[in-house]
Image (cartoon, helix red, strand yellow):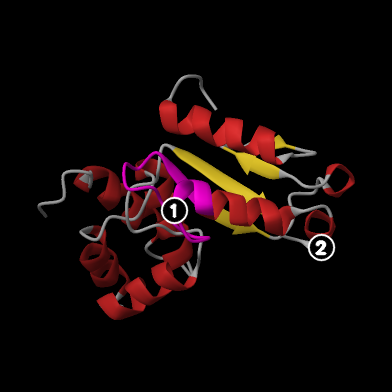
Amino acid sequence: MPDETLDLPVLQRVLEHHRNTPGALLPILHAIQAGTGYVPDAAVPEIAHALNLSQAEVRGVISFYHDFRSTPPARHTLRLCRAESCQSRGAEALAAQLREQLGLDDHGTSADGALSLRPVYCLGACACSPALELDGQVHARLTPERLRALVEGCLQEVKPC
């Protein structure tokens, strides 16, 4: 298996641990992604073989669930809330600003791998709308200026986000 990011002994331990668990595919995919940051393509044949599934079935599950990644993650992940409360407080305008500033669609990653943009449909910060989550930290009552500064900080790596 030529993929350098795939640790075969770790993969084998994960497969052995979950092999006989009913519905083992999702726990296996979660464990692999937790260890590597994504599910490497080279892991798919191993998973399929261990669970007596086709590679198409495994790839279908990876592509169906939006939280699974088949490529390495960006250094920073920005999740802008697009639910009703945030929409009513300007989230759609902020989303348009992000798309323009980054040159990305709502599920894109910058060419340099610095930042991924992901919509989310509630961060639980409705009282402080509009909100976003950047690398796991919620930022509330966003303004266009604060959003621009957060994104520029990530792209320039001037400060940790």
Are the residues at dot 1 and dot 2 in contact (C-beta closer than 8 Å)?
no
Position in image of residue 117 (x %, y %): 51, 51
Q: Magenta part mainly helix, strand or loop?
A: loop
Which residue is farthest left? 2
Residue at which label 1 appears: 103
136 over 101 or under it: above or below: above
Residue drawn at 56 percent across, 49 percent down: 98
138 over 19 or under it: above or below: above
Amino acid bearing label 2: Glu
Element type at mark 2: helix
| Highlighted range, magenta | 100-117
> Within 10 angstroms of label 1, few (less than 14), some, or many (20 or more) residues?
few
> Within 10 angstroms of label 2, few (less than 14), some, or many (20 or more) residues?
some
The answer to whether residue 3 is magenta is no
Quadrant of the image occupied by residue 20: bottom left
Element type at mark 1: loop
Residue at which label 2 appears: 84
Count of numbered marks: 2
Which residue is farthest right? 127
Residue drawn at 41 percent across, 58 percent down: 28
